[in-house]
Each structure stands twice: as C-alpha cells, then as structure tokens.
Image: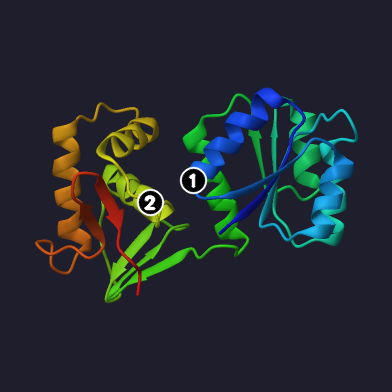
Amino acid sequence: MIKILLVEDDINIIKPLSELLLKENFNVKTADSQKKALMLLEEEKFDVALLDIILREGNGFSLCNAIKSKYDLPVIFLTASGDEYSVVTGLDMGADDYIEKPYRPRELISRIKSVLRRSGKVQSVVTFGELTVDIDKGVAKRDGADVYLSALEYRLFLVFLNNPDTVLTRERLLSEIWDASGDFVNDNTLTVYIKRLREKVEKDPQNPRIICTVRGLGYKLGKSF
C-alpha cells in the first residue's frame, strides 16, 4: 500500500484530505510541523510527501530541502501560496508538483498517482495478456499495434487503471468523466462507452477479463498479467 506523509497544520484540511486519501487506498500519516515530519521520516518509510508551505513551526520550503537532501521521496506542495515566486522556489528545490488550494479532489488524486508513476513508486506500464498500456504516454498497444481510443474512451479507461483494486460504481465513473471532460455524460452514454471500450481492449468482449462487471455494484479492473 502506498504510504503518504501529509504535513499540514490546519485541522479543517487534515481531516477531509486524510479521509479522501484513505478512500483511495492510501496509507496516511500526518504531521503538523516540520519537526514532527522529520521525526516520522526517521521512523518510517514513505512513498510521497504532501507539504503545505506555511506551517506554525518551520515551513514547507526548508522541509522540502531536508527531504530531498536525505530521502528518495517525491514531494508535492499543496498550498494556498500560488504566486509565481512560491511556485518557482518550490520547483527549484526539487518539488515534483505544486497544487494550489482549493484543489479538486479527483485532480489531486490523479496528480499524486502521476508523481508516483514518474518516480517509479508505482508502475506506469500495465500489461493484460497481449494488451500493453503506457499510462504516462497515453498509449495502448495490442501485439505491438496501436489501439486507437477516443479521448473519452481513454479517460474512462484511465479511471480503471488508476483504481486497480477498487469497485467503481456507475455514479463514480460518471462523476470522473464529467470532471475530466466537462461534457454531459448520462447513464446510457456510460453504457455505450463501456461497450466500445471493451470492444477495443478486450480479446473477447463478450467475456471481459480487463473491465469486469461486479453484479449489483459496478465495474472493476481485472488483474494484469
């Protein structure tokens, strides 16, 4: 399980953000100061750190610098300080991404997963038999030949790829596609796109092994192999 260190001193942010990350199957430890964060880093191994810049004790910039000098750990700044100077300073210190508050939950999760893939913490190339998907490049191939997916088909497929151990309800899929595209997608349209996607990625669309139906609940990504 991916382990996240969340460094934030605002209780109104810590609780909902921790709940969001837990729902996404992340293990979360929190620290409200630079000192506590450094103590946790000495005691435990993490896969990514989410840092606020302004802390009551210390600050995110100096903490990022300490992390990068000692640990092999990607850092994402999550802060209301969105001015150009703060962004450039954070990136110059080696931060892997910079997300400004208020953030959209689905975008935040997507960008965390993107940073994890880039840093090698999770795999970016997934194989299902003769189908190979490079998530970062947005390329799908079957037996070396390109599988052409429309933008909405790929966004739908990406939801499954980013949530490999999660049963996705139709409501969740609809909200994900709506957030990503801004287009109106209803329940009937989702059924059509699930069918089209299966026709393109499954070896036998009538007996799907990649996008599997979980009766009464929704859909789930099959195991890669």
Q: What residue type is labelled 2?
A: Thr
Q: Which amino acid does label 1 sit on?
A: Glu
- The answer to which image quadrant residue 54 occupies is top right
Q: Which mark is residue 24?
A: 1
- The spot of residue 117 in percent (x, y) is 55, 59
Q: Residue at x 24, y 44 (%)?
A: 217
Q: Residue 79 carries which label?
A: none
Left/right of residue 191 with respect to residue 174 in the rendered view: left
192 in relation to 45, above or below:
above
Could one spot residue 4 in this view of the protein? yes
Left/right of residue 187 with respect to residue 82 in the rendered view: left
| Residue with the mark numbered 2 | 166
Quadrant of the frame with the N terminus: bottom right
148 in relation to 97, above or below:
below
Could one spot residue 62 in this view of the protein? no
- The answer to which image quadrant residue 184 occupies is top left
129 in relation to 168, above or below:
below
Q: Which residue is drawn at 85% across and 50% down?
A: 38
Crowding around mark 2 (Cα neighbors within 10 Å: few <14, some 14 to 19, many 20+) is: some
Instruction: State the SS at label 2.
Output: loop
Q: Which residue is drawn at 60% across and 24% down?
A: 102
Instruction: State the SS at label 1.
Output: loop
Mark count: 2
Are the residues at dot 2 and dot 1 in contact (C-beta closer than 8 Å)?
Answer: yes
Q: What is the CA distance from the residue labelled 2 to the residue labelled 1?
A: 8 Å
- The spot of residue 168 in percent (x, y) is 32, 45
